[in-house]
Amino acid sequence: MYDDVLAVLDKVLKASKYKQFFVLGKSIGTIPMVKEWVEKRVSGNTFGIWLTPLVKRDAVYEAMMNTDRPSLCVIGDQDRHYDKERISSLKNNSLVSTCIIPQANHSLEITGDMFASIEALKEVIKQVEDFLKRLFS
């Protein structure tokens, strides 16, 4: 999986003159994100958006806990990968903002409630927007 991510990164970085990068991973996509966070192949200002990260995996949790890059973590409290203690401890890193969506599962949906799921999605979008505003204001 990481080889695929590397291929994309190499192609994008070769053709890029950007000085700022966002790396976004959802679920299993947070695993290759860890490797980037550790190896720091992307130079310049790099920011992370971790959607439903696999925080029960030590490597994912440690990458988020020890990051020196501004990051946003969004997860539902009904997500099978949610770990209350680990998510709470991310507050010890001032660069990591966390958002816990009540009753949301791994898809960031509220099981059996379409309207609540729409509200949850609105909250995710609002959190991403607020994160971006904090970075660029």
Image: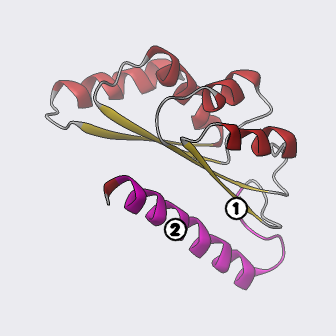
How many labels were placed on the picture? 2
Could you tell me residue 16's position as x and y percent? 17, 33
Could you tell me residue 32's position as x and y percent? 54, 26
Closer to the camera, 91 or 117?
Answer: 91
Mark sitting on residue 33: none
Q: Residue at x 84, y 76 (%)?
A: 112
Q: Secondary structure at mark 1?
A: loop
Predominant secondary structure, magenta span: helix
Applied colour scheme: secondary structure
Which callout, 2 or 1, points to the residue nearer the camera? 2
**Quarter of the rendering containing residue 11:** top left
Report the magenta residues as a range: 107-135
In the rendered structure, does residue 114 fall within the stretch colored magenta?
yes
The C terminus - image quarter? bottom left
Disc 2 marks which residue? 125
**Quarter of the rendering containing residue 21:** top left
Q: Residues within 10 Å of mark 1 (few under 14, many from 20)?
A: many
Q: Residue at x 38, y 52 (%)?
A: 135
Closer to the camera, 90 or 29?
Answer: 90
Disc 1 marks which residue? 108
Q: CA distance from mark 2 to mark 1?
A: 11 Å
Does 35 sit left or right of 91 as displayed? left
Closer to the camera, 24 or 126?
Answer: 126
Q: Residue at x 78, y 64 (%)?
A: 104
Three-letter residue code for mark 1? Leu
Q: Secondary structure at mark 2?
A: helix
Three-letter residue code for mark 2? Ile
Could you tell me residue 89's position as x and y percent? 77, 39
Indicate whether 71 appears above or below 12.
below
